[in-house]
Amino acid sequence: MQQYSGFGLLKHSLSHHENWQRVWRNPTPKKKYDVIIVGGGGHGLATAYYLAKEHNITNVAVIEKGYLGGGNTARNTTIVRSNYLWDEAAHLYEHAMKLWEGLSQDLNYNVMFSQRGCLNLGHTLQDMRDIERRVNANRLNGIDGEVLDAKQVNEIVPILDCSSNARYPVMGASWQPRAGVARHDAVAWGFARGADMRGVDLIQQTEVVDFIIEDGTVVGVKTDRYGDIKADRVGCVTAGHSGVMAAKAGFELPLESHPLQALVSEPIKPILDTVVMSNHVHGYASQSDKGDLVIGAGIDGYTGYGQRGSYSTIEHTIQAIVEMFPIFSRVRMNRQWGGIVDTCPDACPIISETPVKNLFFNCGWGTGGFKATPGSGNVFAASLAKGEMHELAKPFSMFRFHNGALIDEHGAAGVAH
Amino acid sequence: MFLIYCPHCGEHREEEEFHNHGQAHIARPLDPDSCTDEEWGNYMFFRKNPKGLHHELWVHAAGCRKFFNVTRHTATYEIKEVYKIGEQPKVVE
Amino acid sequence: MSDVKNETATVSVMNQLPDASIVGQSPLFHADLATVAKKGPNTGGVSFKEEALLGHITLRMNADNAEQMSVVEKVLGVALPTQPLTSVSQGDVVVRWISPDEWLITVPGLQAFDIETAFQQNMSGHYQVVNVSGGQTLVTLSGKHAKDVIKKSSPIDLHPSEFPVGKVVTSVFAKSSAVIRRSGEETFELVIRRSFSDYLWLWIQDASREYGLVVEA
Amino acid sequence: MSQKNRLQSGGRIDRSKPLTFTYNGKQFEGFAGDTLASALLANGVDIIGRSFKYSRPRGIVAAGAEEPNAIMQLGATEATQVPNVRATQQELFSGLVSGSTNGWPNVEMDLMGLVGKIGGKMMPPGFYYKTFMYPQSMWETYEKVIRQAAGLGRSPKEYDPDIYDKMNQHCDVMVVGAGPAGLMAALAAARGGARVIIADEQNEFGGSLLSSKETVDGKAGSAWVASVTKELEANENVLVLPRSTVNGYHDHNFLTIHQRMTEHLADRAPNGQVRARYHRVRAKWVVLATGAHERPLVFANNDVPGVMVANAVSTYINRYGVVPGNELVLMTTNDNAYHTALDWHDAGRKVQAIVDTRKNPTGPLVDAARERGITVMAGSAVIDVQGSKRVSGVSVASISEDGSKVTSSAKKLSADTVASSGGWSPVVHLSCHTGSRPVWDDSAIGFVPGKTVQQQLTAGAINGHYTTADALSEGLQAGQDALEKLGLAKAEVALPESAQVSESKAMALYHIPHTKPTSQAPKQFVDYQNDVTAAGIELACREGFESIEHVKRYTAMGFGTDQGKLGNINGMAIAASALKQTIPDTGTTIFRPNYTPITFGAIVGRDCKELFDPERYSAMHKWHLEHGAKFEDVGQWKRPWYFPKAGESMQEALNRECLATRESVGILDASTLGKIDIQGKDAREFLGRVYSNAWAKLPVGKCRYGLMLKEDGMVFDDGVTSCLGENHFLMTTTTGGAAGVLTWLELYHQTEWPELEVYFTSVTDHWATMTISGPNSRKLLEELTDADVSKESFGFMDWKPMTVAGVPARVFRISFTGELSFEINVQANYGLHVWEKLFEHGAKYDLTPYGTETMHILRAEKGFIIAGQDTDGSVHPYDLGMGWAVSMNKPFSFIGKRGMKREDCVRADRKQLVGLKTVDPNIVLPEGAQGVFDPTAPIPMPMVGHVTSSYWSANLGRSIAMGFVKGGLEKMGEKVYYPLVDGRVVEAEICSPIFLDPKGERQNV
């Protein structure tokens, strides 16, 4: 097995990098697996990795219709934080945070997790109440968090307009020091490499066109390239396309898939050292290691699978950024793009059994999926391994939308990105 | 950004004047009190969310304030038809 | 003193105006447009004027109701425009189509109550007449560049082939909204909401700067 | 310094207008009509930057939007700094100050270059994923160093002094690009009577005709351009936009154009002018006539300054009168690039050789070169370049017929300039923006626009048809097609003649072989800006990154500010070859907006600073300002928060306002509450369906409080609704909820219950609302009205019409403070008048204006909720202890009724709203504090609910609070603990939320 290190780089440079091994194989699928994961994004790959690593289940295939990590994993704004309001969400995201802190070493792949801290700004009295509420909840849940006043915020981010001249002056913020950003592609590739090394088959460019369901139990999937592939359990981790997949299995989900857009500026010299988010003026920004300002905002209001949204959303986002950071007026926007986010009515995910036996769904992460990647994969793997939901996943059953036990992160949790 | 024909104003207008209200033709159960939790949950939350033709509810929020239906392709974003509340779509899969 | 309908009235109507000794303050009164106008300039590409303290009445009814339609014509002296996005005017009275069941009527300020009363006395069936005079104001933008200022503010197509004299639309205007009517080749009337009027006044001044803004009082 | 590379004559520059500019601290001179790039080349500046990863010296390679290297910092002052300006697109102006964006201490003497040389071997694609992992704690230290090295230019540190503008445009035909194809399309469409917009990113229309010697209709190309432009400008239905980049093509034919208004004049817009204007265009039809970018070839050391794209060299010669060197070697796969050698030769400088990769080049252009005595080396390629800061020579060798192998030993030629041409890449960017996938065209050797759902036409080089004659005829056709689609008659337009020079077949070649394998050869650059090499791409493929998207992401190809305009096709070709598949099988390249980067300021327009979001004011706002109010943002409204007197702290002001109201009389501007006029015979029925309580029997003249729920049973708004007439109601909503509630009512009326006869009209802005509250409020009102406002004739929850201060008013006896209160509503035009009269008469009662904070305290003393503060979308009326506001027996199953009965909503241990008294009455709990039953429990500590409202009550002389507690309604008198951030644990007793006057006697007087 090929370990990565600085020494390895030196060694390979002497042979002109001609002898690097493949990061993953390109296998032909077997006829049957213990577990099939539909969807080779970050969450699906993490699920496969932890199935192999923690549950010793290696007879696993990840089936991806495009290329690994090519969906929302490749399109998000890379923010990692765990300062969620409600216990259920906080525990899940903090579980992910703990895995992030050590992920590069665990994977032997540098996912460039940078714990540079995250500010959620408050601009109104109600924002500040919500911030106080959330930080207090976080601390009692063992999650780091502080409430800062405007002056403290300005000390952390001097380029932020904290003056009273702003249309919505900054009154304070919540601050999670352990939050940060990670290199999104590397996360998918690192999990993929780790899963492949342990024997998981990563099947790319292959679409699952249907589930094979017998007597209400899933027994495999139909693919466009390799025909039927059998499995004891199937986990569907297809983000924006979860509604489409559920329809194939014969049920509906409490989901709508919306475009979520993001954009980057041209690369500039380091100027923003933390993640800054504002729910009220509706924009957030961080600066990538390459120098781009990575910027995002809210979702478009309509169902859309086009990976494109409306331009007015981009305009509003940039207005918010310039409102917060007036010095960026002359910085230039380089590129915009869109993802497809599957949003739940309570802004929390679904990690759940379904009306079809042995078919499990992990979806509904909305705008908050990236930060949960290792945690999502970890609890989903445990659930698939045992055939019953992991303790942390139980509250996220799709059936909460029947009995009313919603985990409403809309109310007071700040932006869910 | 969409250009949407308002069936009440009789002309195309910019998306900025409209708001989307999700899936159309979700009738409120006539007797909510006799619904099970499951039926009521389905009415409130569970949606078709198709990739393809979608019948959805929009309102001309900054214009005539009327709600109406749109049949739109959710991947190409083509609007196939608009029709008033109470009418049925002509473009179906 | 205001008056209230008798006991059997199904809706409450009152004359909301005090006697003439009390001067009303239009939504833009604080901008002191008279002084601004006096200070000039007198020429420029855009002229701005507030038609303060008009009577604004919202009428909601079913245009298919012939009886109600005839009452409207009797009360206003002009038939209700039923073609979408059109307006009619008769003397000081302008009626704007807002929605298939909604019209905005502007009249000289003192006439609002009379018209409300006339509707209540003459019309039967289901309808709504609401005096909204305090909640909005009418401003005109005129001159060679009036349309350019609106193009900076609203996504509406103002080309004469699409937006002839008399057309009226309700649309986005900056981050607020306006009922926009073309009252002449180079003249547009905007009905804007009171609480947004200061913002829109700032906006219009800013958007007009490059053309030269003339304020008329 | 003299302009050593400037020709004595020719070009489109104005030699009578010399301009002085600064680059890296040195002064230079150029001419009006120059770009910064052409002026730098005229002055013989070779190195304009250092590369991102290896810090290699870089020169200008292109002449337009595709330039990857000449990325400059611009700006004479701190506030007018602009990072990352492309020198090839920046027009020169007098006093322009520019500098390179990388290189330390400077681009000539760069120390990082050493690091690049030594460490470069250890930095293949993805090297950072493979290292910097240990120890875990060190990554953020490594990261700081990495960040410092990255990033091109810098942000200004001061605020932008300029203003920007936006304009909405509509047209029948939007023509993108004003080269020969675009001009013809626009001409035809305009003559046919269509409304046309034509935009081009350059300062002059003409496109390729400006930089070639071709003729159109027998005259110089530029003369033809001038005559067409003149006709278009004269047509009032045509909007002519030079210096305008169409940078995004969105759904339903929506396009954005960035028009540079003054960026060519100075780095700060002249007084009053806007720096840039953004056009938001809705077009019925779009004609893309965006042309093509010439594709360089990939060969060893192809980044040494002096290596350029062939067509760029011609552009500098023909358009700017600049020959960027003395000895040229041209390498080409096609005939077209021979023009460059001819131009160079005709400018009087030496062409060392034309190196043609084809075995047997023939045709008029080849003949023309030979006639001039230029050596044509067929079947050969430049396989390596010598020189470090400038090209000093090249190695030329024979290559196999398929271009895959070197077949001879290399021969060295002296040269200071290498021009290369691998053919053309159609500019399909805009077409891609719409989600349309481009398709590979073998004859064009490039991607051309694919199937689209947009109303889109294409003309000229974008279709892979690269000659001027094709451009003119396809442009004309597109214009005529657009007219036909618009239902307009064909226009009278003759096709201009252009000399069609026949060209023989080009060779599809991208990557020039080297004698060594790619991995061992000197670096062969594909994407200059990100230092992506052919070896890097091959390595990525070897490592298993087989999807082109993986290749791009792993190597960072195409992620620069040029977005791969030059390099992407070459990179795909190299990946295809490594993976042994065709280019179309390897994938397409998807470009996203923007076509070229746009300053944020331009996109923001005037939606910034005080115009970022409307500030909404009530009719009394001026008074509040004059009386020192501090304001609170509530939605878009500016509401008075409190009215401090000189020297008063906030708490002192609140204490004073609270006491004055309870002891005498206070006044609140309540105009911001949402107000909806509701009429119709079914109005009552409708209210019964949208409120949780009953409305059937509310008599005329009475008011009632109601809770509005969503279908899930959760409270989303509340307010008082009054019965004005049998069929007439006035509904009030929260300030923030006004618009949402009106939409909610319309939604249910229009979609669910259209049979109900009811109409809604917003009257929020129409009524000014002022609430006088306190024991002296009646006395005050009596002074201003003739009406009988005694307890007997005007009881609690009654409303009455009356005249107040001479103004007709509706007065409501409702109370949010628990005091005797009158809510006076007058038409807003008279609001300030009445307000001032109240103060005239109220002075003797010490009438005290109070703001939202005192309102919050006073209502909390009474246990009244504020929707949005004491609710969060997850609580139903019973959670709030407000079951009294729910009528379960109404015949219609009102909105929210069924939702409240779901399994989880009827749990006994739900969090319920209760009053909270701190054991120490001087401690005011923070709003948002989380309660626990056992403060000694380990973390994570089970939380039982949070504090929603908490104040110092001057009236009670102690703190009061409301909050949620699990099962709290059954726990009266029990304790709950609040562990605070500062380590304190505050103990509080659960109590009724009504702290004052539980029987409601004060409001009933």
Image (tube, helix red, strand yellow):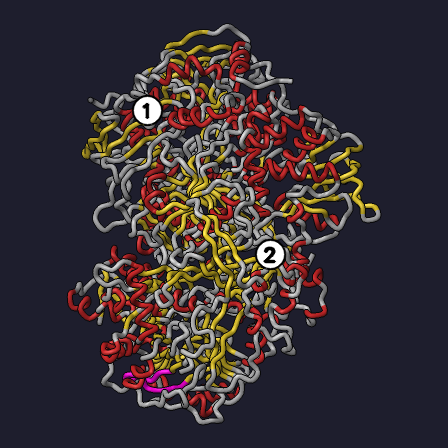
Task: Please state the extent of the stretch shown in magenta in the rendering.
Answer: D800-810
Residue D833 picture location, percent across and down: 26, 77
Q: Give above or below for D429 relative to D911.
A: above
Q: Give above or below for D921 relative to D884.
A: above
Residue for point 48% across, 43% down: A262
Residue for point 71% across, 29% down: A201
Question: Relative to residue C115, is residue D988 drawn left or right?
Answer: right
Is residue A318 in sight in this rendering?
no
Q: Report the number of discs.
A: 2
- Residue A16 or residue A385, whichever sits in front: A385
Residue identified by numbered label 2 = B72
Residue D580 picture location, percent across and down: 64, 22
Q: Quadrant of residue D289?
A: top left
What secondary structure is marked by label 2?
Answer: strand
Q: Chain of mark 2?
A: B
How crowded pointer 2 is (Cα within 10 Å; few <14, some 14-19, many 20+) is rated as many
Q: Quadrant of residue D772?
A: bottom left
Quarter occupied by the N terminus of chain D: top left
- Residue D472 or residue C85, whichever sits in front: C85
Is residue A333 in sight in this rendering?
yes
- Number of the label disc, if any, that sits on residue D38: none
Residue identified by numbered label 1 = D48
How crowded pointer 1 is (Cα within 10 Å; few <14, some 14-19, many 20+) is rated as many
Residue D91 picture location, percent across and down: 29, 36
Q: Chain of mark 1?
A: D
